[in-house]
Image (cartoon, rainbow, N blue to C red):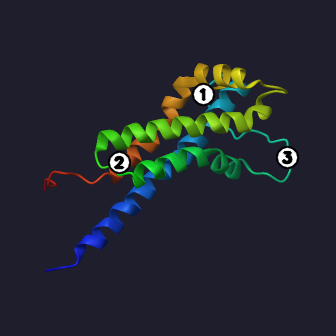
Amino acid sequence: MSNSGPALSCSILARRLLQGLGIPMSAGLFIGLLTGKLRYGQLTLEWPQLLATNSHPFVEVLLGSLPGLVLFIACLALGALRHSVNLLCAFVLTSAISAYCCALLFAQAFGNTWAAGEVFRELYLAQLPLLAMALLPGLLIALWLQPSSRPAAF
């Protein structure tokens, strides 16, 4: 009898962690789309100009994505991501939380002062179509990495 149990669980864990990396990717894509729309009024990608000289948008997106990543890992630890539907729902929820956190972090790049309610209404809720577009690549990666329960057809 082979010892494939731990190897299988390590494979699933690695797969879930790779799926979780789509969360900051989706949040960063949302910020890039949001910046392009607010600057040019059209669908384009652009990193925002940060006020702090020693910061980089990539690092800021990773920091803004931490709440969503922690929640995704908590769902993973609780065993809630065993089914594809649960995985996709958790991915969308945690990515949406991360995108909002990133919008809060980058709000100064979009204007002088923003109240928290204004960020939520103007930079997040009013831009839900951009969020949907930003989520699409991450969802496709999460589905691609999802193990299939049926045998592959040749």
Residue 81's tag is 2
Q: Are marks 3 and 2 in contact (CB under 8 Å)?
A: no
Q: Residue at x 34, y 50 (%)?
A: 144
Looking at the picture, which amino acid does disc 1 mark?
Leu
Neighbour tally class for label 2: few under 14, some 14-19, many 20 plus, Cα within 10 Å: many
Q: Using the numbered discs, state the Cα–Cα distance from disc 3 to disc 2 in whole angstroms.
A: 38 Å
Q: Using the numbered discs, state the Cα–Cα distance from disc 1 to disc 3 in whole angstroms.
A: 26 Å
Q: Position of residue 4 (x, y in %)?
A: 23, 74
Q: Which residue is mark 1?
A: 43
Looking at the picture, which amino acid does disc 3 mark?
Ala
For the residues carrying marks 3 and 2, which lies nearer the camera in this image?
2
Quick one: SS at disc 1?
Answer: loop
Side (left or right) of 124 relative to 49: left
Q: Are marks 1 and 3 in contact (CB under 8 Å)?
A: no
Q: Position of residue 6 (x, y in %)?
A: 30, 72
Q: Which residue is mark 3?
A: 52
Q: Residue at x 78, y 34 (%)?
A: 109
